[in-house]
Amino acid sequence: MVQEEEKQILEKITPTEEERRLVYGIAEEVRRRVEEELRALGVEAEVRVEGSVAKDTWLRGDADIDIFALLPPETPKEFLKTRFLDAARKATKGYRQVERWAEHPYLECTLDGIRLNIVPCYKTRPGKWISATDRTPYHTEYVLKRLNEGLKAEIRLLKAFMKGIGCYGAEIRIGGFSGYLCELLTLNYGGFRQTLEEASEWRPPILIDIEGYYEGHPEDALELFQHPIIVVDPVDEARNAASAVKPKRLWEFVSAARQYLKKPSQIFFFPREKPAPKPEQVRKKLLARGTSHIALAFRPPKAPPDILWGQLFKAEQAVCRFLKRKEYRVLRSACWSDEEKQAVLVYELESRRLPAIKRHVGPPVWMTQHSQQFLEKYLGNKEVATGPVIEEDRWVVYLKTGRTDAKSVLKQTIGKEKMGIPKAILESMKKTLKIHADEEICILCENAEFSRFLDEFLVGRPSWLEHNNTNRKT
Amino acid sequence: MVQEEEKQILEKITPTEEERRLVYGIAEEVRRRVEEELRALGVEAEVRVEGSVAKDTWLRGDADIDIFALLPPETPKEFLKTRFLDAARKATKGYRQVERWAEHPYLECTLDGIRLNIVPCYKTRPGKWISATDRTPYHTEYVLKRLNEGLKAEIRLLKAFMKGIGCYGAEIRIGGFSGYLCELLTLNYGGFRQTLEEASEWRPPILIDIEGYYEGHPEDALELFQHPIIVVDPVDEARNAASAVKPKRLWEFVSAARQYLKKPSQIFFFPREKPAPKPEQVRKKLLARGTSHIALAFRPPKAPPDILWGQLFKAEQAVCRFLKRKEYRVLRSACWSDEEKQAVLVYELESRRLPAIKRHVGPPVWMTQHSQQFLEKYLGNKEVATGPVIEEDRWVVYLKTGRTDAKSVLKQTIGKEKMGIPKAILESMKKTLKIHADEEICILCENAEFSRFLDEFLVGRPSWLEHNNTNRKT
C-alpha cells in the first residue's frame, strides 16, 4: 500500500495522460512502420513494444520506447548488421539517428525529446537464446502477467528512489539497478516500502530467487554468480539480473533505504542540485585540505558509453597502481567524462612529492652472493643517505628519493612504459593529455559539470545522507 | 698458522713482558690478600685467578683481572652480599672501588688503569650450579687444557678483530661475542683465519656443539636455544655460550669476516677514529636529509650498565611503537648514553607532522548498528574532510589530522599515558626530559661523544665496510 508520504511523489513521477497518449502514439506508429519495412524485405518478423512503455512503468518525462523486432531464428547475423539497420532507419526517417552497439547493433532515435530504440532479437524459446536481447520479450511477459495498477505505482516509486540516490541504471558508468531489476524486487517483496525494509537488512550473501530455481541448493547459485547481489532472472536461471550492480551502489541503496524509512523525505527522490562551484572556490577547498591533487585530462576516445566507461575505470585503476608502485600515497581517485570532449582522472595524494628518504631492504647477510651484489650496488652510491647497514640479519639502505613530483613522473612515464592503461585511452592520451597538479586543476572547473563532479568527489557524502544528520546544527 | 698480514697485528696486541709482569704481580698479590681476608672470617675458600689473565689470552693494555673466590656450597647467599664484599674491599684497599651486581654483588676495583673484579662463586660440580658464576672456573680449566702458544695468538687475533669491528663483548649495550666465546670458536675451528672462513658461510640455523652433546638430535638444541647463533657451552649442555649475541652483531661479524678475507687490512683491528663533528656540521647534515629527527634527552637512572642499557633499549622501542601507533612514519631509531649524566633516544621520521588527511575505515554497511553509530559520530563532524562515503561495502571517512607535531605529542603523552617505558626511565624522564626536534638536536652535539654517535647513526655504514668499497673513486 502506498503511504501518505509517497502520494505526493507519485503525483510528480506518474506520466500525465497527455504524455501517455503521445508516447503510445509514437510507439505504435514506429512499431507499424518497422514491421512494414521488414515485410518489404521479405522478413516475417513480429515487431513489439517492450520495456517500461510496454509495462506502463516508466517515469514521467523519462520514456524510453523500446521497439523489438523478433526475427526468425534462421535469420543470419549479417542481416542484423546491414539490412535490419537500413529498415530501422527508413522507419524513423526525420528522427535524429545514432547507431549503437551492444552485443549487436541497434538504432537509437530521438524526436522532440522522446527516445526510441529499434532493437533486433531472435524469436526463440527460453534457454535457447541466440542473442542477449532475446530475453527481453520474456521479461516483458513475465512482469506484465504479475502486474496491477497498484504495483505499477510501487515500481515507479522504487525507480524514482534509485534515480534520486544515483543508483539507477545498469550502464557501467553507474553500475546500479536496472529498470527490470527494480520491477523484480518490487514484485518479489510486494511493494516499494517492503523492498526498502527488506533491503535494510540485507547482508552478504544476498540471494533472491523468485522462481526458486536454486531451492535446496543455494550454494550452486552463490558458486555460479560471484556478484555482491544475486537476483536470479525468472526467465533464465543461468543469469543474474543484478550482475551489473557494483558493491558501492548496492550499499548506497541499502543505506539510503534505512535513512528513508527512519525519516521519509522527497529529497531522496528529488535531490537538490547544488550550483557548480566557481574555480576560485575550488582553489580554496583544495588548498585547505593540505593534500595534493593530480588530474589527467584528455579527449576521450570515440566509443559507445559502456565501452568508454569501462576503459576509463581501468585507466583510473592502472594509474593508481602505478603511483602506489612508485610509493606515492594515494588517498582516493575518481574519473569523469562528458563522453565527448573531455575525460579527467583525478587522484588525491598525501603529497605530490615522495618522502625525502625511503628504506630499501636488501638480502639477508647469509645470502653471500646477493649480499655482495647489494654492497657493490650501494657502497659509495650517491643516492644512499644511510647505510648499507645491517638490521637484524639483513642489509638495508636508506635512499634519497629526490622527492620526485608525481606530476613529472606521470609525464615521463605515460606512453613510454606499460602501465595497464587500455590502448584506446593511451592513444588519446598520447595526443591530448594535460596533467594538472593542485591549483592548476581549477582551470578544468571552467566546465561546470566537472566542477560539480570535483566538488562531490571532495565532499564524498551522498546528499541524501545530510537529511538525517543528527549532528547538524539547524 | 698465523699469516703474514696478522704478524704485524700480533705485535701490537700481544702484551709486553713488562705488562705481563705487572698484571701477574697484581693478580697474585690481590689473590693472596683475598684468600687471607676470607680465612680471617673463618671461610675456607679457594681463591683463583680466572678469565683471560689466567689463560694468557688478554689483549695488550686491556687486562681485566678476575679473582674468583670459590666458596663452599653451604655458604649462605647472605654472606656474599655482606661479609664477602667487606673482605674484598679490605683486600683492595687503595683501589678505586665500585660495587657491581650481576646475579649477585661483586667488587670492581681500578688502580693505575688496571681493572680487577673480585667475584664470589660456589665450588660445585658441573650441572649442580648454585650461582651463574660457578661455571667460570670450569671455563678456565676447559680452555687451558686445550691451549698452546699458537692458539693464544689466534685467540688474540679474533678478539682484536671483534673489538675493531664493534662486535666484542657480551654486555647488553654491545650484544656481541664474549672473550670466552672467541676462545671457543678459535678452539673449534683451529685458528683465526679458519674461524673467519667458516663464519663467512654461516647460515641459519647456526649450531656449534664442540662436545657433541646434541649429536644425532640437533633439533633439541634448536628447540632449547631460540637464539640467532648457538654455541653449546662445553661445560654445560644447557647453556648457549652465544646467547648474548644479537642478530645485528652476528651478521656484522660474518660480513666483516668476508670483507677481511677478500682484502685483509689493519683497519678491521684498528679503526680510524673520526673526529666528532661540530654542531654546525650536524645541523647541515640533518637539514640536507629532508626528514625530521626527534631526540629525547634525559638523565639516566642510576643502575649497573646492563640494567641501564636493557631499559634504554626497551624505552627506545616503546617510544617507537607509540609513534607508529599515532601514525608517524619512523624510519630508524637508536639510543646513546654516557651511563651517567645523559641518555638520548633518537628517532628519524619521514616527517614530524602527520599527513594532512588520513583514511579511516568504518564498518561494512550491512552491520546496521555499527553503521548507525559510525554515521552518528562522523556526520557533520568538523574533523571530517571527506565522507562518510561508501567504498566497496564499507563506510569510510577522511579525517583532518591537524598535522600534529610528534614533538608536542610526545611532550603531552610521556608520563601521562602507558607507553611501555620501563619505570625507572620514566621517573627520570618526568624530572629531566628535554625533547629536541630537528636543528634543536645540535645543542646535544656539544657533547663530542654524542656528536660522534649521531654522526655514525646518520652514516650507518660500518667503517670497515669502506675498505673494500669497489665504487669509491680514489
Image: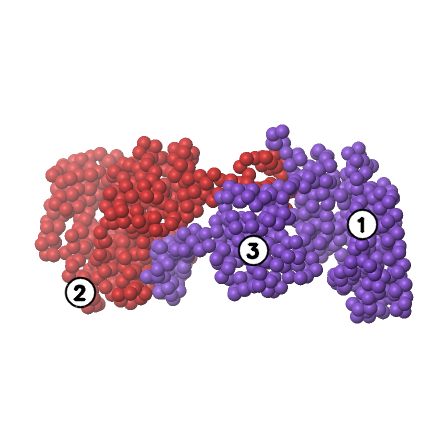
Chain colours: A purple, B red
Residue B273, position as x, y percentages in the image: 22, 54
Q: Which residue shows up at 41% across the image and 60% down it?
A: A363
Which label sits in the foreground, 2 or 3?
3
- Left or right of B103, for residue A91: right
Pick whichever, B468 or B233, lies toward us. Answer: B468
Q: Residues within 10 Å of mark 1 (few under 14, many from 20)?
A: many
Tell me if mark 3 has few (under 14), some (14-19) or many (20+) residues whose alpha carbon lies within 10 angstroms of its own: many
Question: At x 62% / y 52%, what residue is drawn?
Answer: A336
Q: CA distance from mark 1 to mark 3?
A: 36 Å
Q: Is residue B447 above or below residue A428?
A: above
As drawn, which residue projects farthest toward the top?
A474
Which SS class for mark 2?
Answer: helix
Dot 3 amino acid type: Leu
Q: Amino acid at mark 1?
A: Ala
- Whether residue A460 appears in this view of the structure is no
Residue at the image position 80 percent from the left and 49 percent from the top:
A63
Frontmost of labels 2 and 1 is 1
Chain letter for the residue marked with disc 1 in the picture = A
Q: In what quadrant of the picture does the C terminus of chain A appear?
A: top right
Q: Secondary structure at mark 3?
A: strand
Image mark for residue B26 = none
Mark identifier at residue B7: 2
Q: Are marks 2 and 1 in contact (CB under 8 Å)?
A: no
Where in the figure is residue B25, as x and y percent of width and height?
A: 10, 49
Residue in front for this viewpoint, A445 or A231: A445
Q: Look at the numbered disc 1 and give the secondary structure of its residue.
A: loop
* Residue B113 picture location, percent across and down: 14, 46
Above-or-below relation of A15 to B192: above
Q: Residue at x 80, y 45 (%)?
A: A60
- Name the chain under label 3: A
> Would you name the residue on which mark 1 appears?
A63
Disc 3: which residue: A296
